[in-house]
Amino acid sequence: MKELAFGQQNALVLLTLALAMSLVPPVVQSRQEYYYMYQDPYDDDLSLWINEQQVKIFSGVAMKIYAIDNGRVSPHIRDPNFSQYLPVIPSEVSCVNFTWKAGSKKYYYNFDRLMSVDENILKPPTISIKTSGRVPKNAKEFSVILPCSGNVSGIAMFSIGLLIQTRKGKPVPGTPLRIKLRKECAHRGPDPECDKKCANKGVCNEDKICQCPEGYMGQYCQTALCYPQCMNGGNCTAPGTCSCPLGYQGRHCEGGICAEKCLNGGKCIQKDKCECAKGYYGLRCEFSKCVIPCLHDGKCRGVNKCRCKPGLSGDHCQIGRRQRSTCKRPCKHGICKPNHTCECDSGWFGRLCNQREKKRRNTKSPSGGETTAISSTTKHPKK
């Protein structure tokens, strides 16, 4: 049996390797980005990514997916629990291309782990470059190859380890990368009725094997691909399109729908679950953590702690006078006048009323007479 077209092989493996770089648990995903899909054009540091063309073939959406971006390892790939959210790499997949560059700095790499747990099903992964060496200065591709072991069908776990060090031998934070994935191997021969079974505009080739269009995979191109995978029980019904179950919404079914509106600035993050603003709690964020209400339009920010309007202070905004106009910077010990200057409280002066007035006291001179000494509690910055 001949393999799929080379471009399709490379792209389909993103179902798992790309997710390995970027997925986080669903609760976290509702509040954060799912993947690195950007890079500053002026970045000139270590980067490792899968290019837009491969991702588009895989998911129908053109974007880069970064494992390392401008010297920073994606926090998602560093999550110790990320592998449990990943699907099995399908049998049609055999390799994937990555692109990397070192930029203006020198980095050295070492693939210190290329291992298959069950070599009867899957041979150890291989790479198209040396297992150790220097990361190229300019962008260059390399391939990770996942060879099945002949005609044996099954699912095998494999792991890849990548250590990257600076020219001084210091590991890049977040490395060595440790990725554990599962790969399906299935022996599939030619199907004489291939031309009748290829779905979603798949084409039966001369070897009687379905060749799938962008965004589909499977023996008969019956499986649509979504990146990231549909969350919260959603189904991928077309490339890059998730059908969400009742109570969820969003491109990847990542957002919740709350039957009752979240109150006091809360946000609906899961089905009938609100993420509350500081100072509030409850299913709908209906309860304030301030048992004693905040005075003068203050906002509750913690347990019996209020955020006060300018000119007021105290746990409940009970101290001071509310300012009637706005100054560019708040008056520390005073009120803001209509002309946008501070009128200081007794004992304070300065543009922001943040300096104490000098105190006078009488002391005796060596000759027995009295003299006046001036003391001040004003703090002056060190020169």
Image (cartoon, rainbow, N blue to C red):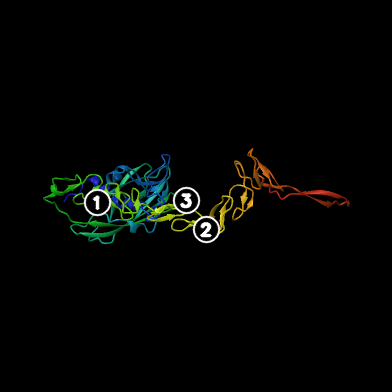
Instruction: Please say whether residue 361 is visible from this viewpoint.
Output: yes
> Where is mark 3, residue-wise?
265
Sequence-first tag of 2 and 1? 1
Among the two numbered marks 3 and 1 on one chain, the one whose residue lies closer to the N terminus = 1
Q: From the viewer's side, name the closer residue of 318 and 97.
A: 318
**Residue 167 in picture, x, y percent from top left:** 43, 49
Mark 3–mark 1 distance (CA, rounded to whole Å): 49 Å
Name the amino acid type tagged 3. Gly
Secondary element at image label 2 = loop
Query: What amino acid is labelled 1 in the image?
Result: Ser
Other residues around mark 2 within 10 Å, as few (<14) / some (14–19) / many (≥20): some
Q: On residue 7, which mark appears?
A: none
Q: Where is residue 263 in the image (x, y as percent from the top left)?
A: 46, 53
Mark 2 lies on residue:
289
Asked whether the residues under the numbered discs 3 and 1 touch, taking CB atoms below 8 Å apart as contact, a structural biologist would say no
Which residue appears farthest toward the left when viewing the image?
192
Quadrant that contains the C terminus: top right
For marks 2 and 1, give the CA distance: 56 Å
State the residue position of label 1.
94
The CA span between labels 2 and 3 is 14 Å
**Mark 3 residue crowding within 10 angstroms, few (<14) / some (14–19) / many (20+):** some
Instruction: Name, please, the residue furthest toward the right.
Output: 368
SS label for mark 1: loop
